[in-house]
Image (tube, grey):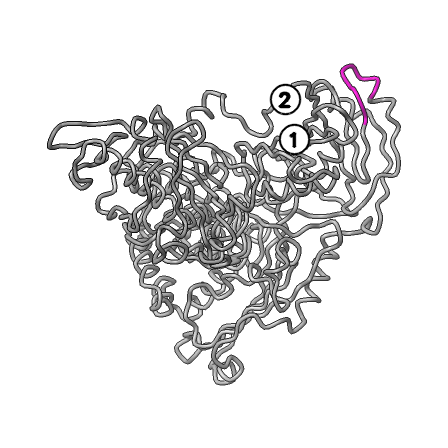
Amino acid sequence: MNRLPELSQATSSDPCIGLSRRHFLKSSAALGGGLLISFSLPSLMRGAQAAEEAGFAPNAYVRIDRDGRIHLTIQPVEMGQGTYTSMPALIAEELEVGLDQVIIEHAPADDSRYANPILGFQVTGGSTSVPANWIPLREAGAAARVLLVAAAAQQWSVPADSCKAEKGEVLHPASGRRLGYGALADAAAGLSLPESIPLKDPRDFRLIGTPAKRTDSPSKVNGTAIFGIDVRPEGMKVAAITICPIVGGTLEGVDSAPAMAVRGVREVVRTDNAVAVIADHMGAARKGLAALQIKWNPGANGQVSSAQMLEDIRKASEQKGVKARNEGNVEEALQKAAKKVDAVYQVPFLAHACLEPVNCTVHVRKDACDLWLGIQVPTRAKTAAAELTGLSEEAVTVHNHLIGGGFGRRLEIDFVIHAVKIAKQVDYPVKVIWSREEDTRHSTLRPYHYSHLSAGLDEKNRPLAWTHKVTGGSILARWAPSAFVNGVDRDAIRDASGPYAFPNINVRYVRHEPPTGITPAFWRGVGHTQNAFMVEGFLDELAHIAQVDPFEYRYPLLQEHPRAIKVLRQLRDTSNWDSPLPQGHGRGLALTYCFSTYAAQVAEVSVGPNGEVRVLKVTTVVDCGIPINPDSVVAQIQGGTIFGLTAALFGNITFKDGRVEQGNFDTYRMLRINEVPEIITHVVESRESPGGLGEVSTVSIAPAVVNAIFAATGKRLRRLPIDPQELRTA
C-alpha cells in the first residue's frame, strides 16, 4: 500500500468514542425489506455536530436481508492488503457471525457518502483502512446485533438481556427458542437505536486476533476474480498506447496507414502527446502500434539527464530551506559538542511496477460515461472524466474493481485522462492498456531526495543535537495543496528524526522540483522510506563512532516509546544478534515508528569479493496494536520486505536525453524467487488500537540491509540502490 498525508490525525478515541451513537448511526428498513445500518464517520476535519447539521451523509452500510445474508458496503478497495478480510471481521466480530456470512459490496464513487474518515475523501492509502474503521465498523456491527436481539426479545415477550446473539441467530437459552437474523430483519428495522451500544471486550474476541484465510484468495486462485484489466463490456475494443518518450514532449505527427493495414485494427487515435491503436484484441493493437512511424516534438526536455538533475539538486540543497521542526537550541548545542558528524544521503526516483499495469476501460456517450478500472481514488477519476467529456459528475459512473497492486500508482489519474481522451473519439467501449514499458517510462515517481544530516556528540559520543535538511520535489504541493503549508511538504520531512528524543532537533525542507513532465508522487511509504533510510543509517554511524552496540545506542533515545524498546529487546533475542557470523557476513538493525505501528528488523547479509550482496535472513518484530488477522500481518511484513528490498538492491529510474532508460523487468529489476531471504516475523501481543501495516517493513528493510553491509565490509553506503562496484574487494 502507498503513503498519504495525514490531513487529520485521528486516533482510536477520536472520531466516535465519547459521542452518542445517535450522532453517527442510523437504522432503517433496507430497500426491499431487511435491516439497514448506515453511519457517518465524523473525522476531525468534519465534526460530528457539523455533519449532523449538514444533513445525514452515511458513508458505509451494513444490510441484513430477509434471507439472513449480511451485506457490507466498504470504502477501501482491495489491492492485496487484505481489506476484504479485515473489514468483514470487524463487523462479524460484533454481529456474532462468521466471515463466510458477510458479502462484500464495494462502494460507488461518492466523497459525500464514502469518505475515508481520517483523510476526508474517498481514498485507499496511507495504511489507514483498519485504523480508520476499527471503531466505526465494530459500532455498526454492534448496533445491528442490539436491534436484532431487541426484536427477538419483543417477539418472545422476554427481557432483551435474557437473549444472546450467536452464529447469525438470536437465542433465548431459557426456553430454547431461536430465530435467524433474516426472520428478524424487518422487525429490527422498525426499532430505534438505544443510546448506549456496548462493544466487546478484546478478551472476548473470537475472530479478531485469530488467523483467518483470506476471503478473496479462492477467486484469485481459480481465476474468477475480476480486476480492472479483466472487464469486457459488450462491444468493447482494446487499445495499445504509446506516449511521447521524452518527458513533457508532444505528438508532432503520425501516418496511420501501416497500422490500419494490420488485420483486426479498427482505428488510430491521436491525443496531444500520445497515439493509440484500437483493435479487436491486444495482439492486433500491439502489432499495429509497432508498425507506426511516429514523429515526436521533444519540447524543452530533450537534453534532460540524471547527471544534470543530480547536480541541480545538489546545488539546491545548499539553500537554507524552510524550517519544519525546531526544538531546543541546535546552534548552541553544536558549539558545545565535543564532536560534529556530517553526512549526505540520497535516494533515487522509483516507479511502482505493479503486477497489473495501469489500464482503464471507458465508454463515452452523448449523455453518460462509464469507467471500468481499479483505482485508489475513484472520485478523482469521476471528476476528471466529467471535466473531459463536459458531462455532469452524476452522468459519470465509476465501476471500481480489484487492483493488482497500487502502492500509490493508482492514486493518480493520468491513465484515466489518457483513456477518456481516446474513448471520446470512438462510439464503443475501449479498454486502454499500458504495456509494461509504457507503465515504467511514464509512471509517476517517488521523488529523488538529497539530504544533509548532522549530529553534535558529547564526550561519550551521545547525541546532543540533530539536524536534517531534506531537499526534493513536493508531492503535496501538487496532489493536496491544502496540506502544503508554509513551504513545507509534511510528507517529505516525515520521520526526519525518527522516534528518537534528541535533546535538540532542527529539520528543514528545500523544495526542488524536477523538470516538467517528471511527476513526484506517492510510493509505498514515501517520506518514511526515504528518511528512515537516512536516519537509521546515520544513527548506525553514530553508534559505530561511539563503539556502542546499535541496540544499546538506541535505548536511551526511546524512553518516550516503551513499545519501541520492547520491540527492540524481543528482536535482539529472536534474531540471534549476538551470535558469531562467518567472514563477509553481517547483521544490521533498523527501527521504525510509522502509521502508529512499531517495527524493527535485523537483516543478515553476505557480501562477495565482486560486491554481490545476498540478503540471507530478515527477522522482524512488529507491534501493530491488536492484529485483526495475524496471518495477514505476517503476509504484509513479507510482502513489504520484498518490495522494499527490491528497491534497495535494484530500484532506480534514470534519464538520458529526456527519456527514462528503464522499461521492462530486464532493466527495472525485481527480486527473483531464488533471491528472497528467509523472512521470520514475530507479532507482539498488544491491546492497543490497530495501526497501519502495509508499508511498515518497506520502510525499515533498506537501512537494515545497508547497516548489515557495513557490519560485513566496513563500507558505509549512503546512496541507493546498493552498488556492488562500491563493495568490490578484488
Q: Which residue is at the front of the view, 490 or 560?
A: 490
Q: Secondary structure at mark 1?
A: strand
Q: Secondary structure at mark 2?
A: loop
Evaluate if marks 2 and 1 touch, with contact meaning CB atoms under 8 Å apart.
yes
Question: Which residue shows up at 47% across the image and 79% down it?
Answer: 328
Disc 1 marks a residue whose amino acid type is Asp
Q: Quadrant of residue 416?
A: top right
Q: Position of residue 630 (x, y in %)?
A: 33, 41
Side of 81 where 375 appears, left or right: right
Numbered mark located on residue 583 in the image: none
Label 1: few (<14), some or many (≥20) within 10 Å? some
Horizontal side of 109 relative to 582 (left or right) equals right
Give 199 or 728, whichever is nearer the viewer: 199
Q: Which residue in the structure is indicated by mark 2?
A: 233
Q: Label 1 belongs to which residue?
A: 370
- Outermost residue, left direction? 174
Q: Earlier in the sequence, mark 2 or mark 1?
A: 2
Give the CA distance from mark 2 to mark 1: 10 Å
Q: Label 2 amino acid?
A: Pro
- Residue 116 forms part of the magenta stretch: no
- Percent from the top left, x then y, of residue 454? 53, 72
* In-image side of 460 versus 486 (left or right): left
Magenta-colored stretch includes residue 262:
yes
The answer to whether residue 679 is seen in the rendering is yes
Identify the residue shown where x is 48% and y is 54%: 51
Vertical placement of 408 versus 572: above or below? above
Q: Which mark is nearer the camera, 2 or 1?
A: 1
Q: Is residue 236 above or below residue 511?
A: above
Tell me the magenta residue range: 260-268
